[in-house]
Image (tube, rainbow, N blue to C red):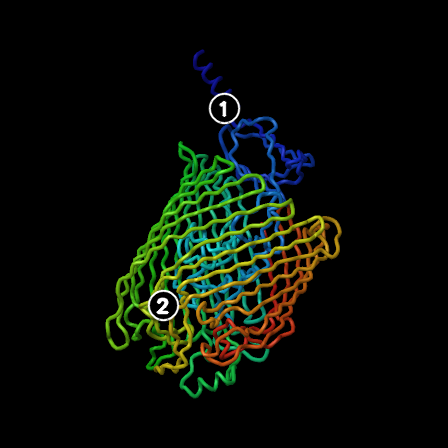
Amino acid sequence: MRKILCLFLFVSVFSLYGQETLNLKIEDNQKQPLPSAVVHFIGKHFVSDAKGQVSIPKLSKGKFPIKVSYLGFLDYEAFITIPASNPYIITMQEEVNQLSGTTLVGRVTQPVKVVTDIDKSQLQQKSGEELAKVLTSVAGISMIQTGATIAKPVIHGLHSNRILILNNEVRQEGQQWGADHAPEIDPSVADKITVVKGADAVRYGSDALGGVIIIAPNKLPYGDGLHGELSPSFASNGRKLATTLKVESSVPKLHHWAWRIQGTLKRSGDIHTADYVVNNTAAREADFSVATGIQKEKGSAELFYSRYENESGVFYGSHIGNLDDLLARFELGRPLTTYPFSYSIEAPKQKVIHHLLKTKAFYFPSFGGKLTVQYAFQKDIRQEFSVRRLNRTRIPALNMKLTSHLMEAFWESIDNPRWKTMAGGSFSHQDNYNQPGTGVVPVIPNFASIGYGFFAIEKYHSGKWNAEAGLRYDYKYLNADGYDMFSQHYGGEHNFHNITYSLGGAWEANPHLSLSSDIGVAWRAPQVNELYSSGLHHGAGTYDLGDASLNPETGVKWITSLKYNNQEKGRFLNLDIYAQVIKGYIYDYPTGETRTLFSGVYPIFQYTQADAFFRGTDLDASLRLAQWGACSNGLSYRLNGSVVFANELKTKRYFPFIPAPKFSQYLEWKNAPKGLFQSLEASIGHTFVAKQTRFEPSQELVPTTPDAYHLFEASVGGTITVGERQTLSVRLSAENLLNQLYKEYTNRFRYYAHDLGRNIHLRLSYNF
């Protein structure tokens, strides 16, 4: 009898297991139901009905992650305990409005920092492009180029070591000192890219004089099912092919555990101008990343690894055999001879492999707040090849390996709605090693570097006001050791330290108008190339000379931003005004002399420093000309522009490679969703770049700058539904539509060739 009773109880309990039902009601702040909201739960997807309701039966008791998505609203993410209240009400918050790539917060208090976001849809419109090209859609962001295939972002006239790039929350550490060293980042990993235009050194440390670029992937899909994205693209100029595949999911029956795999392949051949092919400008790229993590109510832990590999040819015409040919090329400004299109990559060329491994964990301690600890390892391998005698071309003339260890820990308060505190510290160690056996004296010596810093930031919010203040201390030790071309030992130890601070505030005058202002002090220590360069910089085609007596740069940047956004009337204005003084600004300039080597004759560039004054303005505005249906549908006009001036404080002399004034205007048409079409849009655009008249002829290889030019573009695209949750986006666009022959002042190869001719893009994106 006892056995029968136990068996009956066991069967009864077992029958109750997995019989709970979760009834959800999804609504907005006004208690209005949200139909067709997507609920990601226990590895499956559920869609709310016309009343915003979802019923999920046969659930086990326990605590599970849940995510709810709805167009125009922020994703809702939380843990839910089964059994739950009946119904369980989920209130969705309206999403931050995105217009022209600029973050507008509506009734939410305006942030103190001047921040611009490039969201997922904008990234898809630039799929297959390099990071610098993607960022140029933001007013105030331009590129410094080495030919048509190598580019770095420029913020308010500053680039390279004056811009800090965070790749998945990790400081990108490569050989970023060279203008021809593009960031070793695949922008396809990003779900959003954020540009901070102020000098934000307090939070992120040294080198952020120009600003910060934050590459942010989407959060791992805890509790979600298998899904992904396939994004192939083709560009006519260079016959470029690019494909990105991303797949992610949570682990079945272990929904606290999620993973993501992403990969990108790119291949392009010789690019062409409006008149001719630019030979040996082909490129190949293969990128891969994998991420996994476990999320619990009290904290989470994640692991991320990425590998970036790029091989790029360097235009033949930048490496010239003798002085007479060099002077003749400067006068002609284009190649003497050209060859048919090719995908082959020959010397001179460069090859880069970059590894990034990151582990991160955060925890909600019992005393309150959130504690985060992160460690990252990076290894950057850069090889540069020159045309050499006796079959030595296959041996890299430059072979550097940079190893970086980065650790950060910080605590932040999360409970007080008015006061937010963040405090923490960071530590870094770097080791650069020049691989022997190249037969060439390295352009920079071996070096080791150690740095650490401590910071504290306080934020205050009350009604329409927002304020922020921060303080940071940084120390850096550098030890360089090398031998020059005369076998003379050089190098030495350097110690640098500095205190930085920031102070800012924001005011929301009304739901449409806000004003923010921020002043920040940032610094950076001179880099090894600036101190000790002594040799051929292969990728740039220059012979660089450093100065071991250089001092650190210290900059004070003030930036004020005025924003007006009235979505109902279709009016938008964002105006940024900034001024920055940099004490000891370091730059290189052509001395007017040349150095003759076995591989050719090269202009000598010398590093020096002077106090600098940068100032300028960025404009982003739009006006709706006609409307039908929802506010976002209709015909609109958009204008953005940027102007930056830079000169020495004492002598008033202009600095080289400062972007010329640039203005772009667009006429954009968007249609309301209809039938299979989720969206349909088209645009035409015009960009004007002025002639750079603020330059110093003595600091240029040629005594004049390129003429002003006009470029036209057009695009058409749309998104259709191909299944219950699958969508297909197609976009056709054309750049330099009229095939204009032009030169860009900030392209370091403008002395030898023109810029890119007409380029037609076809981009597809399939979400499954």
Residue located farthest toward the top when viewing the structure as drawn = 1
Residue contact at pointers 1 and 2, CB within 8 angstroms: no
Q: Amino acid at mark 1?
A: Phe
Callout 2 crowding tier (Cα within 10 Å): few <14, some 14–19, many ≥20: many
Disc 1, SS? helix
Q: Position of residue 483 (x, y in %)?
A: 26, 72
Mark linked to residue 725: none
Camera-nearest label, 1 or 2:
2
Name the residue: 45% across, 74% down: 314
Q: Nearer the viewer, residue 245 or 742?
A: 742
Residue located farthest toward the bottom when viewing the structure as drawn = 324
Q: Where is 422 relative to 17, above or below?
A: below
Quadrant hosting residue 682: bottom right
Q: Nearer the viewer, residue 366 or 211?
A: 211
Q: Position of residue 26 (x, y in %)?
A: 63, 35
Q: Where is 156 relative to 256, above or below?
A: below
Please give the count of numbered marks on the rendered protein. Answer: 2
Q: Amino acid at mark 2?
A: Glu
Marks 1 and 2, how far apart in space?
A: 72 Å
Q: Position of residue 75 (x, y in %)?
A: 57, 42
Q: Earlier in the sequence, mark 1 or mark 2?
A: 1
Q: Which residue is mark 2?
A: 530
Would residue 727 appear left or right of 745 to someone viewing this image?
right
Would residue 414 appear left or right of 44 to someone viewing this image?
left
Disc 2, SS? helix
Q: Position of residue 144 (x, y in %)?
A: 49, 68
Q: Which residue is mark 1?
A: 14
Is residue 59 in view from this perspective?
yes
Is residue 656 in view from this perspective?
no
Quadrant hosting residue 402: bottom left
**Which quadrant does the N terminus fall into?**
top left
Q: Where is 381 relative to 192, above or below?
A: below
